[in-house]
Image: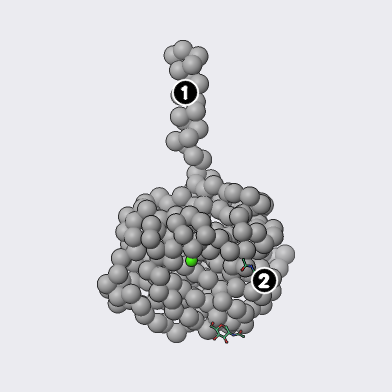
Amino acid sequence: MTMRGLCYFLVLVAVLGSSAEDMEENVFIFPKATATSHVILTPKTTSPLSRFTVCLRYYTDLTRPYSLFSFATSGKDNDILIYKENATVFSVSVGNEDLFFRGPVDTMSWMHTCTSWDSSTGVVTLWINGKPLPRKAMKKGYSVKAQPIIILGQEQDSYGGGFDINQSFVGEITDVNMWDSVLSPNDVQLALANVNWLVGNIISWKSQSYKSKGDVIIQPKFPPSSY
Ligand SMILES: *[C@@H]1O[C@H](CO)[C@@H](O)[C@H](O)[C@H]1NC(C)=O
Ligand SMILES: *[C@@H]1O[C@H](CO)[C@@H](O)[C@H](O)[C@H]1NC(C)=O
Ligand SMILES: [Ca+2]
């Protein structure tokens, strides 16, 4: 291989490799409110979805609304959105429709959530720290569109943009996994316990490619005993 050929090869490896990272021991810190800083998670599959589960863990002292998980598709900015409205109310959006869930009052501790939706019934289940809130339903028969842009730290009002500083996340996020299935109650408990073999097949915190933009810091998790 010529020198120039070798250079092209190395660039190609760097691009294609796009470094799936084991994030198991890490968190993303969003250190301050901005309308720009965010993380784009690269999904392992980009097909339409007739069911899904998203689990993640977060730690924040925000009292204003904020986005936890923003999954936009072309023409549907809230194709999937997990959002905190205020100290007690979560909203879950599918296909730009919203459902509100009254959850436990915020405490200064790590919160774990799993959100699932099943097109065959429309049932949405929101689990907070391993406990399901009363189930609701929407968008029966709908299919979440393909080719999402998945963003942490900001709420998309357009495909990959349209951020609002007043909806930005400030704090720490980790253990993000997404499946193209509805997790069983038992699997939700395993996700809560963070058993490391339970990995998402759309987003897998154990081998995740991502791009971070702006002020986002990766740090090791503190041991659970710190809290
Ligand atoms: C929280 O948000 C819900 C939905 O928007 C609203 O009905 C409720 O009054 C709010 N609660 C507080 C304490 O602001
Ligand atoms: C964000 O909230 C602040 C304080 O309420 C307000 O002054 C500002 O106009 C809001 N910014 C946007 C972009 O909505
Ligand atoms: Ca939006």
Name the colouring of the figure. one colour
Mark 1 crowdedness (10 Å alpha carbons): few <14, some 14-19, many ≥20: few
Q: What element carries label 2?
A: loop
Name the residue at 50% across, 14% down. 3
Vertically, is 184 above or below 31? below
Q: Is mark 1 on a helix, strand or loop?
A: helix
For label 2, the residue is 62
Q: Looking at the rendering, in which quadrant would you find the N terminus?
A: top left
Q: Earlier in the sequence, mark 1 or mark 2?
A: 1
For label 1, the residue is 8
Give residue 203's position: percent from left, percent from top.
45, 55
Kind of residue at badge 2: Leu
Name the residue at 58% across, 49% down. 212
Q: Does the residue labelled 2 lie within 8 Å of ligand 2?
A: no
Give residue 91's position: percent from left, percent from top.
49, 76
Give residue 6's position: percent from left, percent from top.
48, 19
Q: How far apart are marks 1 and 2 (CA)?
A: 46 Å
Kind of residue at badge 1: Tyr
Name the residue at 60% across, 73% down. 65
